[in-house]
Image (spheres, rainbow, N blue to C red):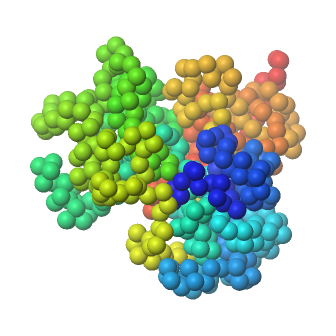
Amino acid sequence: MTNSIADIDKANTIFVIGSNTTEAHPIIALPIIKAARSGAHLIVADPRKIDLVDYAEVWLRQRPGTDIALLNGLMNVIIKENLIDKEFIKERTENFDELKKVVSAYTPDKVEKITGVPAADIRKAARLYAGAKPASIFYSMGITQHSKGTANVFSIANLAMMTGNIGKPGSGVNPLRGQNNVQGACDMGALPNVFTGYQSVSDPQIREKFEAVWKVKLPEKPGLTLMEMMNAAFDGKVKAMYILGENPVLTDADANHVEEALKSLDFLVVQDIFLTETARLADVVLPGVTFAEKNGTFTNTERRVQRVRKAIAPLDNSRFDWRIICELARALGYDMDYTSPAQVMKEIASLTPIYGGISYDRIGKAGLQWPCPTPGHPGTSILHVEKFSRGKGRFNPVEHSEAVEQPDKDFPLVLTTGRWLYQYHTGSMSRRSSLEDISHHPAVEINPADAKKYKIKDGDEVELASRRGKIRLKACVADRSPKGVVFVPFHFAESPVNQLTIAALDPIAKIPELKVCAVKIRKLVARGS
């Protein structure tokens, strides 16, 4: 997030797109709802009638996979009605003329034909976002998990910059992280092209800095992304894999292919707190510990580094994750000799400029937000206040293109996936808790018009199929999903919806298109049969 959670109540307009915030990020949803009730304008863009729609002044119900067209349409109106921030654009950005050329073709009437959103609503939302400042944008995986996810994010940044809604309280571009330490994992280099703090592996000076401390020669080229690794494993080019705290058999697109890829490995190691669906395929399972059994830090969605303090001793034969990694490294011949998480944190600060001033002594109870470059720095609550990290912000104009797989006569429906409030991710933890009493069986959400067409009633058992697989689950007939679109949560191993999704990748971030694919549905057993 460029801004902070506490900043939400300073926004006059809040634009939520591609985020079912109340169910996937309920702690963020609370101040958004409070702000809307207190008079802030709330714009929601989502194909489904999510809970935030009840508080929204404008609901933009775009067809799945048409976010770029919608965002370009908003920008078209803002430019045409001269609602841009001329000074901000002149002083702090570049390439605006190219953006103007691209979005000039995306008139509200044209965008209505692409997205299904009425032109009048597009105009109203554009005027609110550009006119009632400061305005903030919140988005999540409904924006990123597309074959054009990077372009979607470019469009959001374009919209924020052209209106000057960057670097100010109550403004910003605020991606919501899906799990408690996703931000921290990325910060620590859990990406194939960077070291800690997003320092490029292709920069020789940066490599030399890390090589001097770690006393090894480091690769000059980026490694493979997640789906590229799975494809390489399937093709026999990757022979072994070490998976920590992930359950790709349920989370990754085209999950049948992923499972076959993992089975093709010569050797698979999984480190986790439970025997997940992925761990069951492993040659060796290393038992890690939960948050309650270890010390360390998590970095949350607002870039806040927080202490995690051990409440109980590790259970049975489980071990601290950092200690498992150290012992494994030593067994492989590298003398990794850290003695505590505090020592690791000290090294992080020494090698990572954005974490340079963060230490256990300074974190305290409230934590610190990076960038925090020096020991005396207070941390940074708002990014890009005076300038962007690259100097001037660059507009990246992008054109609308359809999702890779479109519905047809054989697979006439669009499938999109997401989360339910009372389950969490692949259920590794939540399905072993009392939450299972509240939400314990998967269902496919289907619009009443589609249910009538396929002679499906609420509670019927159905088969949902794509070109990659099929699953069985119950039908939930509701108007939350639009006609022609079905929704399935991905928490349930007994109905693993990602066996249906498509692994079409974004060309830059290599994220698969989890949010749009073509499916068909048929009734298997009527309710009560």
349 displayed left or right of 20: left
Judge from the rendering whether residue 218 lies leftward or rightward of residue 276; answer left or right: left
Residue 9 x %, y %: 65, 54
Q: Nearer the viewer, residue 456 or 426?
A: 426
Q: How far across and down, in percent of the image, does residue 524 sit?
A: 76, 27
Viewer-side residue, 265 vs 227? 227
> Which residue is pictured at 31% across the width and 16% down the height?
317
Residue 174 lies in what quarter of the image? bottom right
Left or right: where does residue 108 sit relative to residue 208? right
Q: Position of residue 73 (x, y in %)?
A: 71, 72
Q: Quadrant of residue 419?
A: top right
**Residue under the point 47% across and 67% down:** 384
Reply above or below: 366 against 10: above
Please state, as top left, top right, bottom left or bottom right, where the C terminus lies in the image. top right
Q: Residue at 48% of width from left, 39% of height from top? A: 180
Looking at this view, name the residue that lies furthest to the front.
376
Residue 496: percent from the left, percent from the top? 58, 33
* Residue 419 visible in the picture: yes
Q: Is residue 372 above or below residue 468?
A: below
